[in-house]
Amino acid sequence: MKLKQTIGTSRITPYVFIFPFIASFLIFYLYPIISTFIMGFQLVYPGQVEFIGLENYRKLNNPEFKVALKNSFRYTVYTITLLIPLPLLLSVWLNSGNKTVNTIYRSILYVPTLISVVVAGTIMRLLFASSNRSIVNTIAIALGAEPRQWLLGGPSQAMILLLILALWRWVGVNIIYFLSGLQAIPDELYEAADIDGASPLQKLWRITIPLVKNTTIFVTTISIFGGLAMFEESYILWAGTASPNNAGLTIVGYLYKKGFQEGEMGMTSAIGIVLLLIVFTLNTTFLKTFGFFDTEGRQK
Amino acid sequence: MRPNLRLSRKSIIKHIVLVLLCFVYILPLYSLVLAAFRPGRDLLRYGITMQTLIPTGMNFATVKGLYTIREGIYFIWFKNSLLLLVLQASLALFFSSFVAYGLSVYRFKGKKAVTTLVIFLMLVPIQILILPLYKLMITISLMDTFWGVFLPMIVSPFAIFFFKQYIDGIPRDLIDAGRVDGLNEYAIFFRIVVPIMPPAFSAMAIFMSMQSWNNFLWPLIVLRSGTKFTLPIGLNTLLTPYNSAYDLLLIGALAATLPIIIVFIFFQRYFIAGLTSGGVKG
């Protein structure tokens, strides 16, 4: 009642508060999305455009884009496979035992997250340098393997490099997410399980994993998003040039190449729309399946 | 006795694994520190080698490269990065908390739609928008300006979501008390709500600053002239396929990374708090 009275005097107040968001949404999201959508059906020359229907999308049916799609999907699937179970298990470890020691572990694992992709990629290039004396090749030789030209190898080698970089940079963040999920689990549950004589594995499987479900969903969502939109890592690893046989080419890499190196506005827009559709479909289906929107709906 | 023994053996394994893992995780950073004080031509030829990792025979004169190479352009990049960080983070904090307050405390037509939109936008990869945003920047003449870099970033859906969660938790009595005292709605936000938000502000400030400091793709597109570059963009220009200028690149990378790590050591809990907004607990 009181609320109504005060707002009654200025009904627009809430809208004044949300105005910056609305303005920024219209200018920096809606307009670009609509203009991408329209350009996707156009052939864009400097100063003139021509409507060409689905031609840009048809042109995407080419080997290079397929490689990009394949790389991005593989990268996404692999990062999810690695970057969920591993941080989950580590966070279970870090959630018990000496607090100070755990904080030190956690901080060290988190530090790589702070490093810019340019710096991280540069260090990777140097660790995996082609010379026989580079650190990774030295280890390879010591283990009786052949030294490799890591950055110049085929698709699997490129994927390994990208995954190592992802593991190094993102394990720490996911640990933090899982730890915050774990800390919300009441201790009584574990105590009760102890009384029932549950083994650690049973506790993990029956208590921990089900109860960090929301965190897992959240981490998966951002991993799908981040995986499919990955570009910068591969841009730096191959120093801004094409990787051999497009081994490191991703969807956004292809978008960047078409748009900013070849000036194919129409096709670039088509790529953008395809990526948007993929990410949206995957994430909304995923979130719906696991009822994320229900818990979101709790808000007053 | 026995279960205790087993427990400690298990925890020994745990610590061995964790120590090894931490060692592997710190190694690249350690190599950066040592490689930064080595001659660039060796790095170009061999990469980081076992010798690089032995902390002897380091040449601290490489630091001079920061001042001398290309007339000390490095410090211009550093200054640009710092300026952008301050502009972007402070504006993003202001606008995002302002919007979040509106979304949190009022009931109004379209509230649900706007809230859903905020959540949805967190899932739009900014990468797909770079081409039309780039065209927009050309149209409104913001190419090669700092405005062009930070304007699209100042209303952050993530920050709005974060602040909204925080404001949702503030007792409504406090706001009503302000109304009884005759404050108008904006005064309530600035004089009552903002003063109790420092924890949320510090967490987001850290988060936003990190984003700005390390931001790569968008500034790469907007910024054109060398004197406007930020650190990541400037360092990136030193990285070329076969002839990288490792002399400046590595010492520059180190000088760009150390400040963040030092800030992290002192303000760890804010880094963590910025990541774990209420929305994902449990």
Image: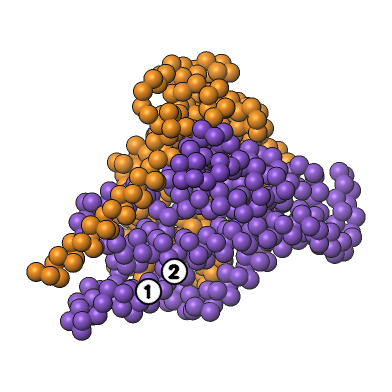
Describe the element under mark 1 as helix, strand or loop. Answer: helix
Query: Looking at the picture, how far across and down is residue A14, in whole percent?
Result: 49, 63
Q: Amino acid at mark 1?
A: Ile
Along the line of sight, which residue is nearer the eye, A50 or A93? Answer: A93
Which quadrant of the structure image shows residue B245? top right
Report the side of B280 relative to A75 (left or right): left
Q: From this view, report whether residue A143 is shown above or below residue A295.
A: above
Residue at screen point 45% across, 64% down: A84
Q: Which color is chain A depicted in?
A: purple
Q: Which mark is residue A209?
A: 1
Report the side of B10 relative to B148 (left or right): left
Question: Where does label 2 land, which residue?
Answer: A216
Q: Residue furthest left?
A: B1
Q: Which mark is residue A57?
A: none
Residue at screen point 63% across, 71% down: A281
Q: Which color is chain B depicted in?
A: orange
Q: Which tag, 1 or 2, sits closer to the chain's start?
A: 1
For mark 1, does the 10 Å Cα neighbourhood hold few (<14), some (14 to 19), or many (20 or more) residues?
A: some
Q: Quadrant of the C terminus of chain B?
A: bottom left
